Image (tube, grey):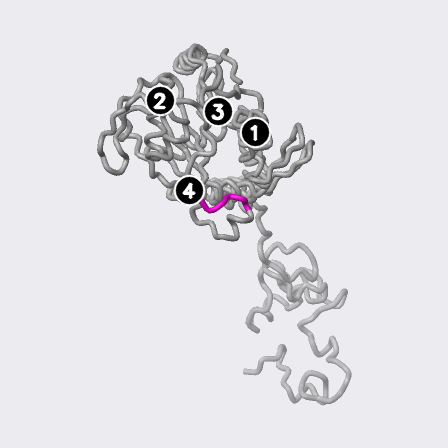
């Protein structure tokens, strides 16, 4: 059976286009009888069934169907290759349905969930990383005959002259000397309570009685003889535990937590935050600490900051002025660390945390929450939300500074009862 309509064959087509002929002219409309143009197509109802339209899904069927229905199928209108759907116009060859609009509510929801998940995972990981860096080396359970605790939390913050981990070059640069062991260069009590935070500096030359204590290493009991020494001698005698015991014995204030930092760690923290801004009231110079400062506002790096807090030979009231400088600088340092530029920038926050945590020595019960509470309390004191003072002094004896017993008693009562401090210091 031949495939051409109305009995036409390849031989009948002659030397025409479309049958391997080299002729340039195309087949005529007469030859392609299945294509009916314009008025040449028989009118409807003239014995010819209605012509199918390809657009309506008929298209190219088999020959029998073509004979029965005609073969125009929209060819003359340019719709021969149109889809079988509602493409809507000539030349529209894409029959795929339109792409649905994005569900923005769903996208925002899952983006928010993803961000919260990342934040939680990062926070938890940071917590355990930081907690693992704390050096919990001080055992306050070894301290005997402790006073009753009051309201609020009391921290004993100590700056030691430890040269642990420092090279000879670093010792020379920071003017620390090369003395063996370690002593206290600064001591402060920070009270954190609901009535305001209070920072009390304890001069290292304070005259105190050395009490009975149990050796932190030997476990042996050493009876007190009523001997008076400088406060920093307690630390030199048996370390942090005896220092806590001595402070509690001479004040009646229970110490809840102990925090210590050495020379190298202090300088590293300052450098990690990019320096600390501070205003120096009066120019001073000290060859022992390496200090050489002009009056006015300036930014101190780690080396300069260490010289600032250690200087005492440049002042007439050497120990008292030094404690004031230490308070001023530590509060400014806490404020600098808490700025958005440090807290919200991981490239600044993690080096700062690492430098601080690596160099801190704390008691065995100290947690990151306690450390954070201490830090923000110091920042608050710098911002004017608390009180900063020296221990009240009544005079001196043998080069030691004697505390004003009446004022000290009143101060301790106010701190124990978590009341606003009304006592003034030197």
- Residue under numbered circle 1: 325
Q: Main secondary structure of the magenta part?
A: loop
- Quadrant in the rendering for residue 231: top left
Q: Is residue 179 magenta?
A: yes
Q: Which residues are magenta?
A: 174-180
Residue occupying the point 49% across, 12% down:
423
- Residue under numbered circle 4: 130
Q: Secondary structure at mark 2?
A: strand
Q: Secondary structure at mark 3?
A: strand
Q: Is 227 in front, or is 7?
A: 227
- Residue under numbered circle 3: 201
Mark 1 to mark 4 CA distance (whole Å): 29 Å
Q: Position of residue 365 (x, y in %)?
A: 33, 32
Mark 2 to mark 1 CA distance (whole Å): 26 Å
Say whether marks 2 and 1 touch (CB < 8 Å).
Answer: no
Q: Earlier in the sequence, mark 2 or mark 1?
A: 2
At label 2, counting other C-alpha atoms closer than 10 Å, the crowd grade (few under 14, some 14-19, many 20 or more) is some
Q: Earlier in the sequence, mark 1 or mark 4?
A: 4
Q: Is residue 375 magenta?
A: no
At label 4, counting other C-alpha atoms closer than 10 Å, the crowd grade (few under 14, some 14-19, many 20 or more) is some
- Between circles 3 and 2, the one closer to the viewer is 2
- Residue under numbered circle 2: 209
Q: Is 149 in front, or is 17?
A: 149
Residue occupying the point 66% across, 28% down:
281
- Between circles 3 and 4, the one closer to the viewer is 3
């Amino acid at each position: 059976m031949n495939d051409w309509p109305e009995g036409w064959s390849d031989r009948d087509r002659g030397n025409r286009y479309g049958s391997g002929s080299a002729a340039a002219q195309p087949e005529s409309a007469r030859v392609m009888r299945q294509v009916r143009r314009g008025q040449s197509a028989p009118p409807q109802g003239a014995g010819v069934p209605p012509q199918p339209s390809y657009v309506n899904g008929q298209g190219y069927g088999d020959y029998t169907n073509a004979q029965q229905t005609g073969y125009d199928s929209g060819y003359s209108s340019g719709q021969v290759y149109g889809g079988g759907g509602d493409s809507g116009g000539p030349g529209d060859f894409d029959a795929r349905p339109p792409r649905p609009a994005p569900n923005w509510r769903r996208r925002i929801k899952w983006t928010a969930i993803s961000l919260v998940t990342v934040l939680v995972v990062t926070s938890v990981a940071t917590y355990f990383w930081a907690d693992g860096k704390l050096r919990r080396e001080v055992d306050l359970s070894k301290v005997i005959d402790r006073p009753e605790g009051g309201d609020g939390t009391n921290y004993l913050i100590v700056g030691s002259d430890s040269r642990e981990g420092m090279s000879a070059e670093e010792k020379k640069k920071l003017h620390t000397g090369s003395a063996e062991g370690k002593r206290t260069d600064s001591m402060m009590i920070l009270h954190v309570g609901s009535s305001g935070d209070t920072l009390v500096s304890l001069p290292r030359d304070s005259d105190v009685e050395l009490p009975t204590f149990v050796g932190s290493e030997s476990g042996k009991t050493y009876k007190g003889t009523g001997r008076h020494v400088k406060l920093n001698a307690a630390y030199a005698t048996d370390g942090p535990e005896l220092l806590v015991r001595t402070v509690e014995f001479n004040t009646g204030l229970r110490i809840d937590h102990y925090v210590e930092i050495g020379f190298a760690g202090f300088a590293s923290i300052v450098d990690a935050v990019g320096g600390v801004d501070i205003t120096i009231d009066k120019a001073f110079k000290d060859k022992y600490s390496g200090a050489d400062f002009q009056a006015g506002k300036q930014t101190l790096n780690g080396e300069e900051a260490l010289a600032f807090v250690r200087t005492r030979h440049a002042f007439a009231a050497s120990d008292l002025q030094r404690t004031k400088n230490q308070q001023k600088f530590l509060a400014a340092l806490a404020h600098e660390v808490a700025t958005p530029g440090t807290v919200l920038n991981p490239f600044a926050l993690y080096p700062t945390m690492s430098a601080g945590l690596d160099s801190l020595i704390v008691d065995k019960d100290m947690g990151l929450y306690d450390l954070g509470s201490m830090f923000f309390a110091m920042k608050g004191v710098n911002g004017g939300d608390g009180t900063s003072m020296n221990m009240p002094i009544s005079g001196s004896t043998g080069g030691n500074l004697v505390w004003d017993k009446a004022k000290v008693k009143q101060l301790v009562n106010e701190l124990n009862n978590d009341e606003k401090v009304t006592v003034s210091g030197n």
